[in-house]
Image (cartoon, coloured by chain):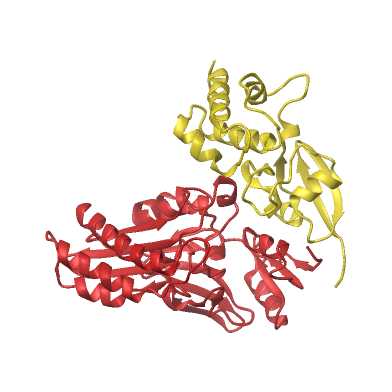
Amino acid sequence: MKPFEYYAPETLEAAVEIMARYEEGVYPVAGGTDLIPKMRYGQIQPKVVVNLKRIPGLAEIVPQDDGSLKIGALATLTQVASSPKVRERYLMVAQIAGKMASVPVRNLATVGGNLCNAAPSADLAPPLIALDAEAVIFGPQGERRVPLEAFFTGPGQTVLGRGELLTAVVVPPPDPQARGTYIKHAHREALDIAIVGVAAWVRFEEGGSVCEDAHIVLGAVAPTPIRAREAEAAIRGAPLTEERIAEAGRLAAEAARPIDDVRGSAWYRREMVAVLTRRALFSVTISQ
Amino acid sequence: MNAKKYPLRLHVNGETYELEVKPQRTLLEVLRNELELTGTNEGCATGDCGACTVLLDGVPVTSCLVFALDAHERQITTIEGLGTTEALHPLQRAFVERGAIQCGYCTPGLIMSAYALLQQNPQPTEAEVRHFIAGNLCRCTGYTKVVEAVLAAAEVSEQ
């Protein structure tokens, strides 16, 4: 790896000021589990690296007054997986965080890193988008928030502008009438990347099986994680019957724009979107 | 490009080291090349194999994915911090006695992972062992004897 200038600022303002000095070649580092391999493979060659880990508070997981949960960008996957605050409110997020990569990597890798690297297969994105999470961004102009769904603009690309950092994601208060699940389809249980990931979140009418609202989010089958909105519309406002679930699977597969790669062909991915969407919807129906 | 060195204070196996390192050096490189603690091995250098696993502030991490400067003022435990040739750590003894070592390359990383597991869960089930060490690849043993050794060491420490 080539040398670079190294900063370890102790405030967010200082980090943003350093980041904003450079038009390119400046990279924040949190866990380092994506940055360091990319540097080693020569995919990126930073001129400046800004370590965010000395900034207090960025790793905290804090319930907000309105019932939402703020998950700091520097919270590690291990923290998220084991946090009772996450487990009790958003089990699907804690569960996938505890299955990504491996134990020693989960102790380093962060929520912010997983999202900012913006891999189409990033496992935290589909469940967090399904939960309507917001990205909290801090930059030279102060703080702004964007829906996490709108945070991703392409493979490895986000809405972050010059000098901007993702500081947290805020997940809305849990809905007692809603169930969610995320299914990751991969060859191996550990140290593997999703071939397809599907998150489903469904809110049921009180005491009934009528689906009031649904979010279906697909990972690894488009340049960014995407909502399958036509599939969602197909099940909204009616009981979740086998026929409707099958139709949602078909529409979700239509929404996918997968590619062929080493992990799977586009054809296979599209087929699996239908399968996993059905499986996810059955699973939230049964757990109802 | 500057090749500036930065001051670094590491606490490794109870000793404190004052160093100056280039910013691109990983913790693994500094442990091996500067401190000559060569028990920690480099396998893939991209966080997939676990051969470089050490404890950083008590939790196992792949030291190839940590900039050395990020370990400034933090506590590190390597395989050299567990036992000595004369007095093996119970995990090391169990690995030897159960034939859980063959070429030995992955062994320091596996033992550090197993050590971390037993610290937080002294009586793990076989499934818990297998899940916890999933980040440590071994091409010789097929893992069966490794898992047996970890469970045996857990029993020993219980007695």
Instruction: Write the residue at 20% across / 70% down.
Output: A235
Classify residue B79 as left or right of residue A159: right
Report the front residue among A154 and A253: A253
The relative height of residue B114 versus residue A179 in the rendered view (above or below) is above
- Chain coloured yellow: B
Instruction: Write the residue at 47% across / 35% down.
Output: B128
- Chain coloured red: A
The relative height of residue A210 versus residue A104 in the rendered view (above or below) is below
Is there any visible trace of residue A179 in the rendered image?
no
Is there any visible trace of residue A124 in the rendered image?
yes
Report the front residue among A66 and A162: A162
Look at the image and tell me in which quarter the N terminus of chain A lies.
bottom right
Classify residue A41 as left or right of residue A276: right
Report the front residue among A161 and B1: B1
Look at the image and tell me in which quarter the C terminus of chain A lies.
bottom left
The relative height of residue B110 versus residue B87 in the rendered view (above or below) is below
The relative height of residue A143 versus residue A102 in the rendered view (above or below) is below
Percent x, y for residue A225? 43, 71
